């Protein structure tokens, strides 16, 4: 209490302003979550989880299954490419290399491109030129390009944060470069990498514009990656734009919210487990 009173007026003002900003952010989050839950929870009925979509039940289950498929395929493509690109930039590339600078500038440029542009690229390249049509695979490939800069930059910063003493200790024990990276450096950087994967997953789950062009909006469970389907975000957009099922749209938002929370909790658990096993 005495230290708080001894603060200069400007320090006191900045401290109060910081706490006010943090509290405002928390309250806004609570208000958004509360509004969605209160508006959507009454419409979470069994008919909303029917396996087949009809105009009467407007089931979200096909969209939920499509969302899981979209997340799995997108991460399966983007995570290995992004992580191993970061490993090359941090562990193998020479410092000051022009190619490294070009890759980083390219990643930063890709991160700033609007999602609608990715959708136009996806429909021209994957849907038309490759002949995949509007399919889950076309949407997943488009989203993997969209989230690749995020995963790569997050993995790069996480690898840089690993102390050099870890690498030196492994080299001193006779471990090779590749073994050091895979067994020592990568597990130590896994919490930061998984944080990037969580952010990328949130962008996949919430993406609408790019998927309308590439994955389509058919309300059914895709029989294969080459089939069309709608994700939860597209399902919510379709219901709200029709204006006839606003309550079901809020219920879809509730399910989408809990899906994101579940993915975040699972990723945090896996990160702790990996760190525990690595040490």
Image: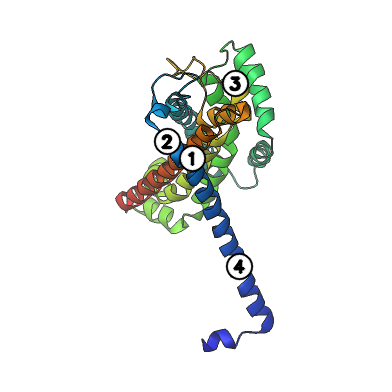
Spot occupied by residue 277 in the image (x, y as percentages of width and height): 30, 49
Name the residue that disc number 3 marks: 214
Q: Earlier in the sequence, mark 1 or mark 4?
A: 4
Q: CA distance from mark 2 to mark 1?
A: 7 Å
**Marking on residue 44:** 2
Alpha carbon separation for disc pair 4 and 2: 36 Å
At label 1, counting other C-alpha atoms closer than 10 Å, the crowd grade (few under 14, some 14-19, many 20 or more) is: many
Mark 2 is surrounded, within 10 Å at the Cα level, by few (under 14), some (14 to 19) or many (20 or more) other residues, namely some
Q: Note whether 74 is above or below 220 in the view shown.
A: below
Which residue sits at x=63%, y=41%?
100
Q: How is the image coloured?
A: rainbow
Disc 4 to disc 3, how far (Cα)? 43 Å
215 sits left or right of 261 in the view: right
Neighbor class of circle 3 (other Cα within 10 Å; few <14, some 14-19, many 20+) is many
Q: Earlier in the sequence, mark 4 or mark 2?
A: 4
- Closer-to-camera residue (241/273): 241
Front residue of 256/268: it is: 256
Give x and y (percent) for residue 186: 42, 46
Q: Nearer the viewer, residue 165 or 54?
A: 54
- The tag on residue 40 is 1
Q: Secondary structure at mark 3?
A: helix
Cβ–Cβ under 8 Å for marks 2 and 1: yes
> Where in the figure is residue 183, as x and y percent of width and height?
36, 45
Q: Are marks 4 and 2 in contact (CB under 8 Å)?
A: no
Q: Which residue is mark 4?
A: 20
């Amino acid at each position: 209490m005495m230290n708080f009173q001894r603060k200069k007026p400007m320090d006191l003002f900045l401290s109060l302003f910081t706490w006010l900003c943090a509290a405002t952010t928390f309250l806004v989050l609570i208000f958004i979550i509360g509004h969605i839950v209160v508006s959507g929870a009454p419409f979470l009925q069994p008919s909303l989880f029917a396996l087949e979509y009809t105009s009467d039940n407007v089931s979200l289950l096909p969209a939920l299954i499509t969302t899981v498929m979209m997340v799995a395929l997108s991460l399966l493509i983007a995570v290995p490419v992004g992580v191993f690109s970061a490993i090359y930039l941090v562990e193998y590339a020479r410092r000051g290399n022009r190619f490294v600078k070009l890759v980083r500038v390219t990643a930063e440029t890709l991160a700033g491109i609007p999602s609608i542009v990715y959708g136009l690229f996806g429909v021209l390249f994957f849907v038309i030129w490759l002949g995949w049509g509007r399919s889950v695979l076309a949407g997943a490939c488009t989203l993997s390009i969209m989230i690749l800069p995020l995963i790569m930059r997050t993995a790069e910063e996480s690898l840089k944060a690993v102390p050099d003493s870890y690498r030196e200790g492994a080299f001193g024990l006779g471990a090779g470069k590749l073994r050091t990276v895979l067994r020592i450096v990568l597990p130590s950087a896994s919490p930061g990498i998984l944080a990037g994967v969580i952010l990328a997953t949130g962008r996949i789950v919430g993406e609408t514009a790019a998927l309308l062009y590439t994955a389509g909006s058919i309300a059914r469970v895709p029989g294969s990656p080459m089939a069309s389907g709608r994700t939860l975000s597209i399902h919510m957009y379709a219901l709200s734009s029709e204006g006839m099922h606003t309550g079901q749209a809020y219920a879809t938002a509730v399910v989408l919210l809990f899906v994101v929370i579940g993915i975040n909790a699972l990723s945090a658990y896996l990160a702790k487990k990996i760190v525990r096993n690595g040490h």
